[in-house]
Amino acid sequence: MPLGHLLVIALVNVIWGTNLVLTKVALLELPPLTFAALRFALILAVLAPLLKPVRGEMGKVMLTGLTMGALHFTLIYVGLQRAEDIAGIAIATQLYVPFATILSILFLGERIGWRRTLGISLAFGGVAWMSFDPKVFADLDALVLVSGGAMMGAAGTIMMKRIRGARVFQLQAWIAAVSFPLLTIASVVFETGQREALVAAPIHVYAILVFSALGASLIGHGGMYWLLQRHDVSVISPTTIASTFIGIGLGVVLLNEVLTLEVVIGGAISLLGVLIVALRQPRRGPTPPAAMPPILPRRQRR
């Protein structure tokens, strides 16, 4: 994998790991669906000029927006708000890795050799080892919700991989356009006290909201979409495990959580698996970059 691609992976992991902990802080002040709706409102406001139809692909685009956007964030944010311990949630988000790999094999025809199979097994095994921490089981309902969110994210990734002719930020604009109204309606139906919470929220909550929208979505998800256009899902998805350890580490520093032996051992096993998967190439080469659509329309590039 080229060095530039590895640097993008590192940046995405730092942003996502940081965003997980900061979002937990924000959800102490705002209802989860309200926070998610505002996040997509900001994204839509920034990317509205790119909201143009993708010819012949709009059905897939809508399904991607539903799964990777509204459903994924509903389950993740509700679970994150209910959880007492950030480590368990960070672990559960990485169920995305086996979900995405299995779906990529079933629906995209991707093939993996024994080394990458070993790497994925180690990555998943490390996450499983961390789950022996008793604190993880204290948030069972939250873990179930977040696991469902991970599955929705994996399904959205597979759907996105099948879309042709959509640029990175154009697809993000459509995900926001699909998710914002759905999350707004869900917030009105299922949540109360939104206005009071918005008025009472301290300034750092709004700073987190901006970071979540512009950093985690535009840069983080944008970088991930860019990578997925150039590599197999089963190559890229396991590398996001690194964000788990960043999130756990920040949870220890910022939220005073205790780092247990189970987390340390499981983290080391998973990181080894991530390295194996990230450094091994798929049996069939990735689509040449020249065949991929650019991030921005030609007239917008300089």
Image (tube, rainbow, N blue to C red):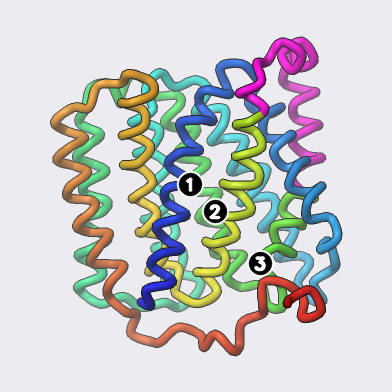
Segment colored magenta: 178-206
Characterize the local packing of mark 1: few (<14), some (14-19) or many (20 or more) Cα atoms within 10 angstroms: many
Q: Quadrant of the C terminus?
A: bottom right
The answer to whether residue 72 is left or right of residue 270 is: right
Residue under the image location 45 percent in, 31 percent down: 21
The answer to whether residue 230 is left or right of residue 187 is: left
Label 3 element class:
helix
Label 1 element class:
helix
Magenta region includes residue 194? yes
User: Does label 3 or label 2 sit earlier along the sequence?
Assistant: 3
Q: Position of residue 299 (x, y in %)?
A: 81, 79
Q: Which amino acid lies under the numbered mark 1 shown in the image of this protein?
A: Ile
Q: Position of residue 208 (x, y in %)?
A: 60, 31
Magenta region includes residue 107? no
Q: CA distance from mark 2 to mark 1?
A: 6 Å
Q: Are marks 2 and 1 in contact (CB under 8 Å)?
A: yes
User: Does label 1 or label 3 sit earlier along the sequence?
Assistant: 1
Q: Position of residue 29 (x, y in %)?
A: 61, 16
Residue 213's tag is none
Q: Which amino acid lies under the numbered mark 2 shown in the image of this protein?
A: Gly
Most extreme residue toward the front is 302
The answer to whether residue 250 is above or below residue 29 is below
Mark 3, residue position = 168
Residue under the image location 24 percent in, 21 percent down: 258
Residue under the image location 44 percent in, 59 percent down: 100
Mark 2, residue position = 220
The answer to whether residue 284 is left or right of residue 295 is: left
Q: Which amino acid lies under the numbered mark 3 shown in the image of this protein?
A: Val
User: Does label 2 or label 1 sit earlier along the sequence?
Assistant: 1
Q: Quadrant of the N terminus?
A: bottom left
Residue 15's tag is 1
